[in-house]
Amino acid sequence: MVKQYKIEKVEDFKNIFKNYQSLIFADHSGLKAENMYYIRTKLSETEANLKILKNTLALRAASQVYEEIDFSEIFKGPTSMVVCKKDAASVAKLLKSLMKEFETLKIKGGLFEGKIYGPEGVERLATLPTKDVLLAQLLGLLNNPIVGLVTVLSALPRNLAVVLDAVRQKKEKELELHS
C-alpha cells in the first residue's frame, strides 16, 4: 500500500514537471502551519499553488522528466514547490515580498521553460514587470506611430484652415480701409 502511494506521488510530480513551465522551489523550514496557510492563500490569488514535497519522490520525478538537469541541490532539506499557472513574474514578486514578511522562507531556485535557475535568477525575475504591464507597454509602443501619423495628417487641414482664416481677415481689413 505504501509503495503504491509513492508510485502515485511520483506520477503526480511528473505530471506537474511536464505540464507547467514555471516552478519555484522554496525552503519552508521554520514556518508555522498558519503561516503556510496564509502563504497558500496569497499564492492562490496569483493563480499559483504551493505543494510540500517529499524530496526523494520529487527528485525521482524531476530526474525522469528532465534527465539532463541535476536537481540534487534543490531537493535538500524541507522543500516546497510553487506551481505557477500563469505569470511567473508576479508569483516571484509575491514570494519576494513574503520572504520579507517571513524571514525563514527562502527561495532555493526555479525551473522556467526547461532551465533551472538559482535563487538569484528567481529574484531577478521578480524585478521584471508583470505580463499585463509588458503587454500594455507593447500596445503603447505599437500605438505611438499611429498617433503620430494621425497628428501629422490632421495638422495639414488645421494649418490650411488657419491660413485661410488669416487671408479672410486680411481681406476684410482691406475692405474696411477702402470703404
Image (cartoon, helix red, strand yellow):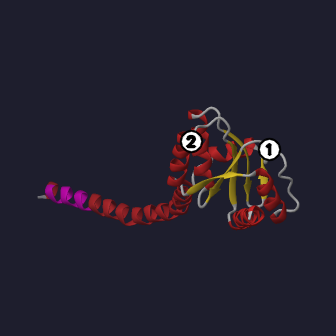
Magenta part of the chain: 168-176
What residue occupies the far front of the structure in this picture? 1
Where in the figure is residue 34, as x and y percent of width and height? Answer: 52, 41
Residue visible at 20% across and 57% down in the picture: 174
**Amino acid bearing label 2:** Ala
Distance from label 1 to label 2 (Cα)?
A: 21 Å
Q: Secondary structure at mark 2?
A: helix
Seen in the picture, residue 121 relative to 20 is either above or below; the reply is above
Q: In the rendered image, which quarter is residue 36 located in?
A: top right
Seen in the picture, residue 95 relative to 59 is either above or below; the reply is above
Residue 178 is covered by the magenta coloring: no
What residue occupies the far left of the structure in this picture? 179
Image quarter of the C terminus? bottom left
**Amino acid bearing label 1:** Lys
- Which residue is nearer to you in this view: 125 or 34? 34
- Which residue is nearer to you in this view: 135 or 121? 121
What residue occupies the far right of the structure in this picture? 68
Closer to the N terminus: mark 1 or mark 2?
2
Q: Which mark is residue 33?
A: 2
Residue visible at 54% across and 55% down in the picture: 137
Seen in the picture, residue 7 relative to 70 is either above or below; the reply is below
Residue that carries the numbered disc 1 in the rendered image? 76
- Which residue is nearer to you in this view: 27 or 126? 27
Q: Which mark is residue 107?
A: none
Where in the figure is residue 37, as x and y percent of width and height? Answer: 53, 46
Where in the figure is residue 91, as x and y percent of width and height? Answer: 59, 50
**Left or right placement of residue 60 versus residue 42 in this view:** right
The majority secondary structure of the magenta stretch comes to: helix
Dot 1 alpha-carbon crowd within 10 angstroms: few under 14, some 14 to 19, many 20 or more: some
Q: Secondary structure at mark 1?
A: loop
Dot 2 alpha-carbon crowd within 10 angstroms: few under 14, some 14 to 19, many 20 or more: few
